[in-house]
Image: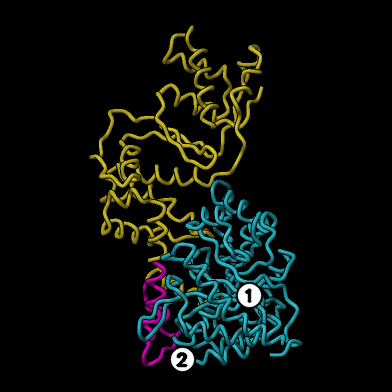
């Protein structure tokens, strides 16, 4: 891609998801991580260790906030108490940006604690765009929405996931956290072309990448975030860097968490893939 | 009901009851059929919540063993679906289920362990407040003592436990085999709190437990001295009560002294 195609976006470099297992190592070693992403809900607590470590690590690193419970696509009303708590945490952390998922997590007051896919159609776009606008008004900032991994396709869907995501983000004027692994997982499970997905996403909307591992069960893949990133996802990442340019990239490990050094090595691999592509693009 | 709400209601009902409410809504492929696709969500839903219960109740898990804890967890998940945005709060009614329902209610140590562990969990991330030093009370004039009230750290919680739950919990926490559950003749008084980042618990004498409850409830030092006469001779009451106050302050439980 040429230099003038690169949109002006904040760029943080290469980050990791902050996990409790690594608190002490991060504080003592101050590792070569450009930024950390926190799971917002883990710090929406009254006090104690979570907020202590959050504040301490925030002193040394830029942070972004990533939520799992906004339930943007739920037919329940937006949870105003949740948004209020989120706003308070934003004030405390002063993150570079805030993201959540393009999904729903429960209805009728229940929370299923999952990132459930939406039907991809015009009605959903209109409904979710309005809710994203409400959230952006409440928080006083643009948010990023992340594509989720999925295992079902609905009869109610009338368009592809990438058309849905691209149209919705234009309509809501929000940004995208593009999870490269989730595209790979969903492409495998739904038998679509991951490159077609990537190539349909508007370049100027993408502000962050997620990379993660998963569990391959042979004829389907579950997005477990408990393994290293696999080679085909790295290849997809390289394609994404070529298309989108310099986008803040992080590795998201949620289970079977290895020592910090292992994730730093994996992050260096991401750097080694992105750097030559970005240097070439500006040459 | 909109089409979206209907779809989501049906999906949620499927996850909660494992019925056939989603069959009409989804399409599969030859290699990955609809039932198997839906099963990924159904399995993940329960496994995620079971994991949350394991995190919140490690000692209860040990007491019950894997199989029985799994059975209890699935029963809890069915009885008390989550309604909180954060999974951290999932499991708050575990001690009630264990106390009220068969077969668990015949083993009351289980309910008490759940209550103890949930209280420790609450102390872990209770609100931060700075605590008083012992010098803060030495400045109070003798005339002001009777009307003196204390504010306690948000983590401070009193429990009365019949079973030797704290001893069992300690052994399990140290990866040692727990002793046999044992009931006391009378409930023992305990207090749980957090000092800086560390949770603490200790047993308290019956009169100290009563005094702590009363002061948390907003009674003043004079009221406490009056009440303690049930256990102590009147001439020794003030010294005993003042000793409690100093202990609570040294333990880091007191956030303000109001005169």
* Residue at image mark 1: A208
Residue B50 image offset from top left, x and y in percent: 38, 61
> Does A173 appear in magenta?
no
Is B62 on the left or on the right of A232, as rendered?
Answer: left
Q: Neighbour class for label 2 at 10 Å: few (<14), some, many (≥20)?
A: few
Which residue appears at 50% of the width and 18% of the height? B243
Secondary structure, mark 1, is strand
**Residue indicated by mark 2:** A191
- Quadrant containing the C terminus of chain B in the rendered view: top right
User: Chain coloured yellow: which letter?
Assistant: B
Picture colour for chain A: cyan
What segment carries the magenta color? B18-46
Q: Residue at x 44, y 9 (%)?
A: B233
Q: Is residue B149 above or below residue B108?
A: above
Q: Is residue A140 visible?
A: yes
Contact check, label 2 and label 1, Cβ < 8 Å: no
Name which of mark 2 and mark 1 comes first in the sequence. 2
Q: Is residue B219 above or below residue A178?
A: above
**Residue A112 visible here:** no
Q: Secondary structure at mark 2?
A: loop
Of marks 2 and 1, the one in the foreground: 1
């Amino acid at each position: 891609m040429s230099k003038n195609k690169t949109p002006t976006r904040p760029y943080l470099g290469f980050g990791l998801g902050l996990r409790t297992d690594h608190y002490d190592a991060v504080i003592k070693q101050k590792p070569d991580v450009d930024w950390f992403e926190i799971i917002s809900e883990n710090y929406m607590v009254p006090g104690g260790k979570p907020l202590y470590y959050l504040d301490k690590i925030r002193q040394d690193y830029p942070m972004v906030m990533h939520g799992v419970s906004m339930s943007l696509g739920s037919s329940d009303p937006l949870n105003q108490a949740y948004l209020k708590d989120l706003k308070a945490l934003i004030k405390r952390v002063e993150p570079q940006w805030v993201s959540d998922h393009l999904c729903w997590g429960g209805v009728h007051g229940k929370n299923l604690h999952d990132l459930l896919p939406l039907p991809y159609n015009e009605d959903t776009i209109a409904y979710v765009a309005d809710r994203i606008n409400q959230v952006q008004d409440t928080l006083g900032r643009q948010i990023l929405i992340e594509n989720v991994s999925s295992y079902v396709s609905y009869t109610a869907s009338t368009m592809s996931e990438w058309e849905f995501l691209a149209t919705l983000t234009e309509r809501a004027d929000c940004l995208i956290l593009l999870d490269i692994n989730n595209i790979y997982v969903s492409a495998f499970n739904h038998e679509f072309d991951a490159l077609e997905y990537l190539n349909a996403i508007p370049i100027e909307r993408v502000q962050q990448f997620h990379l993660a591992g998963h569990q391959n069960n042979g004829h389907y893949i579950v997005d477990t975030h408990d393994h290293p990133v696999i080679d085909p996802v790295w290849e997809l990442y390289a394609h994404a860097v070529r298309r989108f340019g310099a986008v803040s990239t992080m590795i998201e490990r949620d289970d079977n968490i290895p020592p910090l050094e292992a994730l730093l090595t994996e992050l260096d691999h991401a750097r080694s893939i992105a750097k030559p592509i970005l240097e070439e693009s500006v040459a | 009901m909109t089409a979206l709400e209907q779809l989501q209601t049906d999906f949620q009902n499927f996850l909660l009851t494992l019925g056939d409410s989603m069959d009409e809504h989804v399409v599969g492929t030859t290699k990955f059929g609809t039932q198997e696709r839906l099963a990924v969500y159904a399995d993940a839903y329960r496994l995620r919540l079971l994991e949350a219960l394991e995190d919140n109740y490690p000692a209860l898990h040990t007491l019950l063993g894997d199989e029985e804890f799994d059975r209890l967890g699935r029963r809890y998940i069915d009885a008390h679906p989550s309604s909180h945005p954060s999974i951290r709060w999932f499991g708050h009614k575990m001690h009630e289920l264990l106390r009220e329902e068969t077969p668990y209610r015949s083993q009351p140590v289980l309910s008490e362990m759940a209550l103890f562990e949930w209280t420790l969990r609450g102390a872990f991330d209770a609100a931060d407040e700075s605590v008083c030093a012992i010098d803060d009370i030495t400045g109070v004039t003798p005339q002001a003592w009777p009307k003196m009230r204390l504010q306690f750290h948000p983590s401070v919680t009193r429990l009365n436990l019949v079973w030797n739950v704290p001893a069992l919990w300690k052994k399990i926490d140290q990866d040692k085999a727990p002793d046999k559950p044992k009931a006391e003749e009378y409930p023992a008084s305990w207090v749980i709190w957090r000092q800086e980042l560390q949770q603490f618990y200790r047993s308290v004498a019956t009169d100290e437990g009563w005094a702590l409850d009363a002061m948390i409830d907003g009674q003043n030092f004079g009221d406490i001295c009056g009440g303690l006469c049930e256990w102590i001779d009147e001439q020794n009451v003030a010294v005993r009560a003042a000793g409690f106050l100093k202990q609570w302050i040294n333990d880091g439980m007191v956030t303000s002294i109001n005169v």
